[in-house]
Image (spheres, helix red, strand yellow):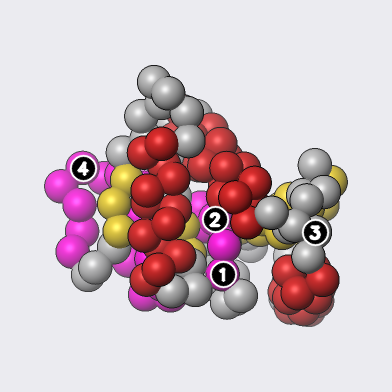
Amino acid sequence: MPEVSFYVLNSDSQQQRQEFACKLIEKIYRSGHFCYVLTDSAEQAEQIDKALWTFRAGSFVPHQIYRGEIPEFTNTILIGGDAIPDGWQNVIVNLSALYPPTAAPTERILEILDNSEESKQAGRQRYRHYQQAQLAIATHKM
């Protein structure tokens, strides 16, 4: 069963949420893992794709938007909707309002919430969903 971590930011800024997501994705990559970044829309996927190129000078995180084709290199971070390909389900960074898969092979789900009422409400619903699935949940106030 996957472990779920909620990161609750003290700002309602979408830019700060994106920057935090980029730092978290970079940390995942530097630790020798790769992940799937789950987004609500193609527009949001494009935004996080662009942010990963520009969030820190000198940083390099291999990534691409998933459009149905598996990347040549398996340690590439994929960004996209709910059609998560095999091999990218172990670690999911959820930037969407969707419920990511909670069965194997998913090992970790990372939820990033900003301090807006809309984000917190959606986060509470996903928290209850994970509780009902009897997953281990940790909350980190940033």
Which span is picked out in magenta? Answer: 69-96
Rendered position, 77 above or below 126: above
**How far is the residue under mark 4 from the one under mark 2?**
19 Å
**Can residue 138 be seen in this snapshot?**
no
- Which residue is denoted by mark 1 in the rendering? 96
Circle 4 residues within 10 Å: few <14, some 14–19, many ≥20:
few
**How far is the residue under mark 1 from the one under mark 4?**
25 Å
**How far is the residue under mark 3 from the one under mark 4?**
36 Å
In the image, is residue 113 part of the stretch drawn in magenta?
no
What amino acid type is highlighted by mark number 2?
Val
Q: Nearer the viewer, residue 133 or 92?
A: 92
Q: Who's the residue at 54% across and 55% down the image?
A: 93
- Which residue is denoted by mark 4 in the rendering? 73
Q: Secondary structure at mark 4?
A: loop
Which quadrant would the C terminus be assigned to in this image? Answer: top right
Q: Quadrant of residue 44?
A: bottom left
**How far is the residue under mark 2 from the one under mark 1?**
9 Å
Q: Nearer the viewer, residue 134 or 88?
A: 88
**In the image, which is nearer the foreground, mark 3 or mark 2?**
3
What amino acid type is highlighted by mark number 3?
Asn
- Which residue is denoted by mark 2 in the rendering? 93
In the image, is residue 82 part of the stretch drawn in magenta?
yes
x, y percentage for residue 5? 71, 53
